[in-house]
Amino acid sequence: MQAENQPHACGTTEGKLPGKCAAMVFPYIAMQENTPDTYSKEEGLSTGTLFPGLNLPFFRAVKSQMNCAEPALCELMALDFAVAELGLYLDTHKDDKDAFALYTYYANLYKEGKEKYEKQYGPLNQISTARLGSYSWLSDPWPWDYERGSK
Amino acid sequence: MFVYEKKLQYPIRIKNTNPKLASVIISQYGGPDGELGASLRYLSQRFSMPYPELKGLLTDIGTEELGHLEMVGTIVHQLTRNLTEEQIRTAGFDAYFVDHTAGVYPTAASGFPWSAAGIGVKGDVICDLTEDLAAEQKARVTYDNILRLSDDPDVNDVIKFLRAREIVHFQRFGEGLRLAKDRMGEKNVYYMNPSFDK
């Protein structure tokens, strides 16, 4: 059923997306563009995303703030988070060289930071005990403990 | 394989015990839209994914969800520390307490134990990724609802983080669908199932 006044811009099996035609019967999420803006790693962790473009908070929780009792651990968490977040981004943007450079930057900092942290506070992986020289894997606290204390 | 790292993804330190709140938040541990289901859904769907981007994405998000499972367990554990006699009787926690004391058990807030009936593995790339989009939204709404029910800033801060992750994951699954469609490169993407029809 062709409308008389307006010829169809898209093909029979296509429908309109903003600025283009695309196949019908398929869900479309806009691809995040390459080299997206990023927060600092600290802000990324406290926000829950490294990308300002994906920060869509719920009105009930805008005021709450990250509760960090152990700065060295939070620093490591922030690095690890940046690596994980960029890792997911790269899974769908494997050719974004800027993002991979940032991934590499944070990954190297994480590796260094983790070894330093483990020397001071104890192993994060069981196998790290071999490098640390004693079997300190069992030392409290475990991640879910409220009492943090020294190891 | 998986290797354990002895830290949480995000810091959790909840000062005040609140068993009633724990009995609601447990749903994100073992409820229909909780983190256990999320993790098992993605890590199981991986096996029939036909394209490398999707094998990677499901592996990485499924692994992150295991970390979220640990976080939700930590919230429940800390909310039920040092309960008083009075708290186990009157705080709306008694039904959970009688079966699990202060242990962390994968169950929905309604009392229904964790069930694979809440997740789907269809063995079809478009179907599974579309399920994953819905799953992220269901988890997002559950976290919204927890934020409506909780006044504890120590808890809400962590829930806010977990909620933000659902939105990022939704975006990535959507992008995964787009990449899948590009790979299929056909006008009719329903002509066959690339997970099965080689």
Image (cartoon, coloured by chain):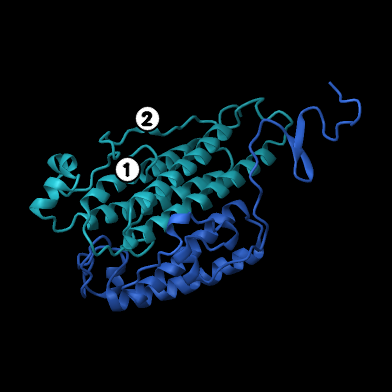
Chain colours: A blue, B cyan
Q: Secondary structure at mark 1?
A: helix
Residues at marks 2 and 1 on the same chain = yes
Q: Could you tell me if residue B2 is visible in this image?
A: no
**Quadrant of res B124:** top right
Amino acid on which the number 2 mark rests in the picture: Ala
Residue placed farthest to the right in the image?
A: A5
Q: Position of residue A53 (x, y in %)?
A: 60, 59
Tell me if B31 is positioned left or right of B42 in this view: left
User: Which is more toward the observer, B53 or B29?
Assistant: B29
- Residue for point 25% across, 75% down: A133
Q: Nearer the viewer, residue B3 or B174?
A: B174
Lower position in the chain sequence, tag 2 or tag 1: 1
| Coordinates of residue B94 in the picture (x, y in percent) | 15, 42
Chain letter of disc 1?
B
Q: How many marks?
A: 2
Crowdedness near tag 1: few (<14), some (14–19) or many (≥20) residues, C-alpha within 10 Å = many
Q: Position of residue B50 (x, y in %)?
A: 57, 38
User: Which residue matches tag 2?
Assistant: B117
Residue at horizontal 51 percent and vertical 51 percent from the top: B167
The answer to whether marks 2 and 1 mark residues whose Cβ atoms lie closer than 8 Å is: no
Q: Nearer the viewer, residue A33 or B149?
A: B149
Could you tell me residue B5's position as x and y percent? Answer: 34, 61
Query: What residue is at 65 percent from the left and 41 percent from the top?
Result: A28
Disc 1 target residue: B27
Q: Secondary structure at mark 2?
A: helix
Q: Position of A143 compared to B174: left or right?
A: left
* Mark 2 burial class by Cα count in 10 Å: few <14, some 14-19, many 20+: few
Choose mark 2 or mark 1, whichever is in front.
1
- Compared with residue B188, is residue B163 higher up or lower down, i.e. above or below? below
Amino acid type for the residue under numbered disc 1: Ser
Query: In screen coordinates, is A74 left or right of B24?
Result: right
| Residue at the outermost top position | A1
